[in-house]
Image (cartoon, rainbow, N blue to C red):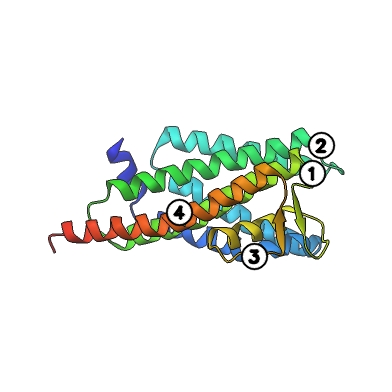
Amino acid sequence: MKDTIQTLGDGNKIAFVLMAVILLSVSYPLADMGDAAALIYLGVYVILVCSTIYFVSGNRILLVLNLLLTFAITLFAVMNIFNDPVPVWLGMAWNVSGLVQQLLVFALLVAFIIQSKAVNRKVLYAAVTIYFFMATCFATLFNLIEIVSPGAFIASSGAEITPTILTYFSLVTISTLGYGDIIPVAPAAQSLAVLESSVGTLYIAILIGRFVGLYQQDPS
């Protein structure tokens, strides 16, 4: 397993995933800006999916698993487009399949950093990618809560709560900006928001400690 994790970190695989997840994180407003813009955003999401497939391409089992998840995500996405309103079960299936894929890549990146013996470019790429993937995972969890319990979040402007808004909320929560324009009102939403802000803060502290330890172990 150790060799498998290190193989996943070879070449530019992590850099590709990092580029894709950052691009997705900054382009999410396109999803609510009309059909043409939404298609562009969908294209960015496809880039992220392709990056995860490339990332695990060195392991046959992980590759097959990721391809199955990609097929499920694509199928549910198409079904979402042709169903208005979207059934609760379909919205949950889409988000859960996406969450599983996100957690798969997240776990592999965490394992890669833990098994690394020195701080190098790939370790730095992995660390930043993990941070953005955490925000993406929490955004998906927030969306699941809103699907199950509509009204779990409210906007101070009165705007409709959409996956796009919850992505924004996740990004400002993990960085502890706390603008207060999106407010979690359901207990589950509040607990998850507190957890995300705590995880975001602790991650930076733990990461710095890990990097210091790796630097001290580096014989060069």
Residue bearing the label numbered 2: 87
Mark 3 or mark 1: name the one nearer the start of the chain: 3
Q: Quadrant of residue 172?
A: bottom right
Q: Are marks 2 and 1 in contact (CB under 8 Å)?
A: no
Name the mark on residue 116.
none
Q: Amino acid at mark 1?
A: Pro
Front disc: 4 or 1:
1
Q: Secondary structure at mark 1?
A: loop
Q: Which residue is mark 3?
A: 27
Residue 132 vertical position relative to residue 3 in the rendered view, above or below:
below
Q: Amino acid at mark 2?
A: Pro
Mark nearer the N terminus (2 vs 1):
2
Give the class, few, some or many, for how many residues have Cα within 10 Å of label 2's Cα (few <14, many ≥20).
few
Of the numbered discs in the image, which one, if any, rests on residue 150?
A: 1
Q: Please tell me which residue is depicted at 74% across the width and 38% down the height of the picture.
A: 148
In the image, 210: left or right of 108? left
- Neighbours of disc 3 within 10 Å: few (<14), some (14-19), many (20+): some
* Nearer-N-terminus badge (3/2): 3
